[in-house]
Amino acid sequence: MRPSTKTVDEATGRYLPIIYAEELPFWEGAKKRTLQLQRCNQCEKPWYPIGPTCPHCFSTDFRWDVMSGKGFVHAKVVYHKAWTKWFEDKVPYAVVQVQLAEGPRLTSNVLECNVRDVRIGMPVEVTYQDITEEITLVQFRPDSGALAK
Ligand code: ZN
């Protein structure tokens, strides 16, 4: 995988994430169905968004570590307006912030769930969505194991 500044898939009109060099382990992990974030070698805390410095202790000594993929919906917003043609058959859809069991929060979507059923506090687990041959998104779905408790 290589860094990419391509922002739109011409074939579908879908917006694409810009892939920065320092993020490659995250994107390569997603492609392999693992959620990897940076974890500090000094204070042992993981963090997100991706960056060169631990936001907890300011160390630059880190490793990439596989997260559990478990978390809950911390916040959500529902879009009813299609801002581009690609979204016309997608609205309404929810954009959520998921707080992982390990602490970091990721902005994502909840798949396999009706938009009306996405609730703050609902348990979710990671899933993956291939959107191009190179790019796989980290997404979430209801955590049926947690709901069964
Ligand atoms: Zn740290």
Image (cartoon, helix red, strand yellow):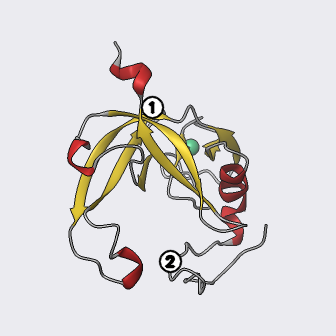
Residue 148 in view of the camera: yes
Compare residues 10 and 36 and report the one nearer the observer: 10
- Pinpoint residue 29: horizontal percent, then vertical percent: 70, 49
Q: CA distance from mark 1 to mark 2?
A: 30 Å
Taking the spot 71% from the left edge, 62% from the top edge, the residue there is 24
| CB under 8 Å between discs 1 and 2 | no
User: What is the quadrant of residue 113 in the picture?
Assistant: top left
Compare residues 116 and 95 and report the one nearer the observer: 116
Pointer 1: residues within 10 angstroms few (<14), some, or many (20+)? some
Taking the spot 31% from the left edge, 41% from the top edge, the residue there is 73
Of callouts 1 and 2, which one flags the residue occurring earlier in the amino acid sequence? 2
Determine the secondary structure under disc 2. Answer: loop
Taking the spot 71% from the left edge, 70% from the top edge, the residue there is 21
Taking the spot 23% from the left edge, 58% from the top edge, the residue there is 77
Tell me which amino acid carries mark 1.
Ala
Q: Is mark 1 within 8 Å of ligand 1?
A: no
Residue 41 in view of the camera: no
Pointer 2: residues within 10 angstroms few (<14), some, or many (20+)? some
Q: Is residue 65 above or below residue 26?
A: above
- Pinpoint residue 2: horizontal percent, then vertical percent: 77, 72
Residue 101's tag is 1
User: What is the quadrant of residue 134 in the picture?
Assistant: bottom right
Residue 14's tag is 2
- Pinpoint residue 146: horizontal percent, then vertical percent: 39, 21
Q: Is residue 43 above or below residue 81?
A: above
- Pinpoint residue 53: horizontal percent, then vertical percent: 58, 57
